[in-house]
Amino acid sequence: MDLFEKCSQFKRHIDIEAAGYMPYFRPISENNGPMVKMEGHDVIMAGTNNYLGLSLDPRVKEAALQATRLFGTACSGSRYINGTLDLHNQLEAALAGFTGREAALIFSTGFQTNQGAIVPLISESDYLVSDAENHNSIIQGSLIVKGKHGPDRVKVYRHNDMAHLDEVLSSLPADSGKFIVFDGVFSMSGELVFLPELVAVAKKHGARTMLDDAHGFGVLGDHGRGTANHFGMDDEVDLLMGTFSKSFASQGGFLAGRREVIDYIKYGSPALQYSASMPPAQIASVLKSIEIMLQEPERMERLFHIQKSVREGLKALGFNVLDGQVPIVAVILADDVLTFSFWRELMNEGVFVNAVIHPAVPQGMQLLRLSFMSTTEDHHIDTILEKFEVVGKRLGVFKQDTAAGY
């Protein structure tokens, strides 16, 4: 069979596109924060990771412009060769201070950051232990571990099931290295990790921990310091991971932890060694975003108000909405066709959300993912709820015993 035969047989997207229900790769022609232009129309953006609204902040944009004027548009090399600027060192120092860690290390993408930590830290005598609903970047890192050291070196525990985690760790050799990697905020559902319980299990078995806080930084904790800070457990997690493409209004990722661990990864991570470094504008954007986060905690307060209003409003209408406290609101529809249809109808009504199906979520948990920025206004919230009610009635998704008014 020819290698490309599977490509010619792949037709799933064609039917969805032809029917006008394709929710992915939708181009934005103009970005004005909570309002964007898509398909030639103004649409409320209710499916963003720009949580603090800083990617359009004039101060962040000016910082990016100044860095470009000074250093150009790219570093044209890896950190190892010619790709380290003063700005890289400044950002790593700022992140170490922000997280209260000895050192930090930045990568060119968040995806690379997880791979870049996992691959060098797991050797032939170690085990990677991963939550079943971890981000795909962690999963891809685990596949590299399997390829290098064998499939038995990766163990998966049931999502947020600390009893099962305990069982998994108990099955491993007592003298082996154990590395538990988990999301702080699970990106599709907005659910938080059970961090106190997880840390207790890890300590029981002498395991090390890494918290992927891509969706926690800027959203939880003191001035956005993340999930560990939210739980009052800053000193209880060994390694913190974050991305810049959410609250930090840029692109890239970072690790923060003990200096010896960061140095080991710095000099042993192929993802860092063989990638061009973050461009100047991206670094400057993160530096300015951290400064604003520390000065303007009201942005986080606004986020909490928004998610609470939307979550309670959708529940009152009769939708199946997951509980939570972060600006990710998951509306469970449990069916591919219904999820795509609801997404299309909302777009027609001027509201953009994210349609999420398997494998991004388990079968039966297909959902519409709403996520917000602190610059979303109250009248946007009112419109979102109004349009959900209109489309919900049209598509008949309400439970009759819980729906409001009918």
Image: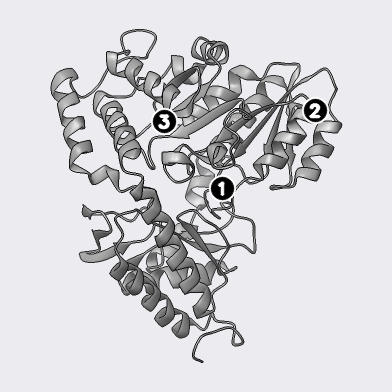
Q: Residue at x 37, y 68 (%)?
A: 20
Q: Residue at x 47, y 28 (%)?
A: 99
- Above or below for 292 versus 375: above
**Number of numbered discs present?**
3
Residues at discs 3 and 2 in contact (Cβ within 8 Å)? no
**Mark 3 = which residue?**
109
In which image quadrant can residue 44 be found?
A: bottom left
Q: Residue at x 36, y 14 (%)?
A: 78
- Pointer 3 local density, CA inside 10 Å: few below 14, some 14–19, many at least 20: many
User: Residue 312 versus residue 230: which sits nearer the camera?
Assistant: 230
Q: Specify the label residue 186 is tagged with.
A: 1
Residue type for callout 2:
His
- Above or below for 300 versus 22: above
Side of 274 relative to 70 (left or right): right
In which image quadrant can residue 391 be found?
A: bottom left
Residue 180 position, x and y percent, is: 68, 31
**Mark 2 = which residue?**
205
Disc 2, SS: loop
Quadrant where the N terminus is found in the figure: top right
Side of 36 relative to 228 (left or right): left
Q: In the image, which is nearer the foreground, mark 1 or mark 3?
A: 1
